[in-house]
Amino acid sequence: MKKEIISIIGNLVLDRIIIRDKCMDSCPGGTAFYAGIALAKLNAGVQLISKIGADYPDHFLTILMDEGINIDSVTKSKTKNSTSFLLNYSDNLENREARVTCRGPVITPEDIPKRINQSRVVLLGMVASEIDPEVISLLDHDNIHLIGADLHFIREISDDGKITLGQGASFRPFMHKIDVIKGSFVELKAFAGTGNIKQALKKISSMGPKIILATDGANGSILYYKGAFFKIPAYRVIVEETTGAGDIFLSSFLYFCGLKQDDPVKSAYLASAAASFVVEGNGISSLGNEEEIRKCAEILN
């Protein structure tokens, strides 16, 4: 049976992570990597549209290929280095300071293969303003069941790599083409220009997205759908590593809602359960299979 395809647009990243004053060696990161691996482990067909630099290690690409991920549309620049981050976590892992140490190549409409519109789901997984918003105009709603985006497109990056939250002005004209938006409470309130999270969700919904996922770490999340708010709890675990948890949350939601056709509320519970596997173990390698995730979600519900 041919697998239905989820396409992820966004740059693969090189991360250096500091936890409790210990700096790890450079490791693969970014929404494209974490979401891609998570979806492949859930047995979805995955293709990446991404740009990397000459500094991106070949063995990181081998990890993706070994998971069965299509990297035919991952292109390597000869003149620019890869998108890179320095991630410094607080001792309790609840807070993270992220700094961009290199901004990689921009993904333009010319980089998008025509087969993108054969996808069941498309995830816009930008991390450092690397997607030209005109890319969204190429996505055909008549063929693609769900288009999801992380609100990271409101990030503004200074010359020294500091990240602040802007208004995402260049993406606002395309909001009606995005079905699912995921962001933290802080990001969503910044984008909507209000300090009230429920008002923020209503305002963003009025721009076009049908489903909005608002994450609040260990406090769980809020799903806004069809004018109603649904509180989604987080599974109580001992947190060991949170890098990529938001990417697993969004990609898992799109998998269950877009490919398995679970309703949005159930899909949000399943996404919360999937993220719990990652934060309590050794990152993405700890993600459970679909059966394990569904069992975990039953405890949450």
Image (cartoon, rainbow, N blue to C red):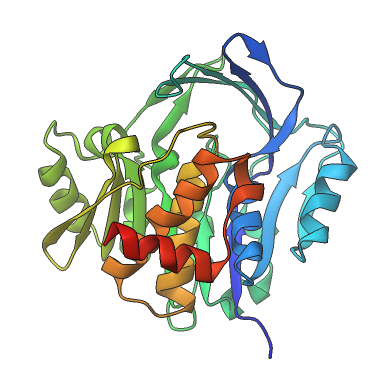
Position in image of residue 254 (x %, y %): 45, 65
Residue at 10%, 44% (x, y): give it.
Answer: 199
Residue drawn where x is 82% and y is 41% of the image: 77
Q: For this view, does 11 lie left or right of residue 99? A: right
Q: Is residue 179 left or right of residue 158?
A: left
**Which residue appears farthest toward the bottom when viewing the image?**
1
For this view, does 109 lie left or right of residue 238? right
Q: Is residue 179 visible?
A: no
Residue 181 found in image quarter:
bottom left
Q: Which quarter of the image is occupied by the N terminus?
A: bottom right
State the residue in front, 283 or 144: 283
Point 49% across, 68% down: residue: 255
- Outermost residue to the top: 21
Quarter of the figure that contains the C terminus: bottom left
- Residue closer to the observer: 187 or 155: 187
Q: Is residue 90 visible?
A: yes
Q: Which percent across, then down, holds residue 3?
A: 65, 81
Marker count (numbered): 0
- Residue 203 in the image: above or below residue 98: below
Which corner quadrant of the image does residue 112 belong to?
A: bottom right
Relative to 177, say whether 50 is above or below.
above
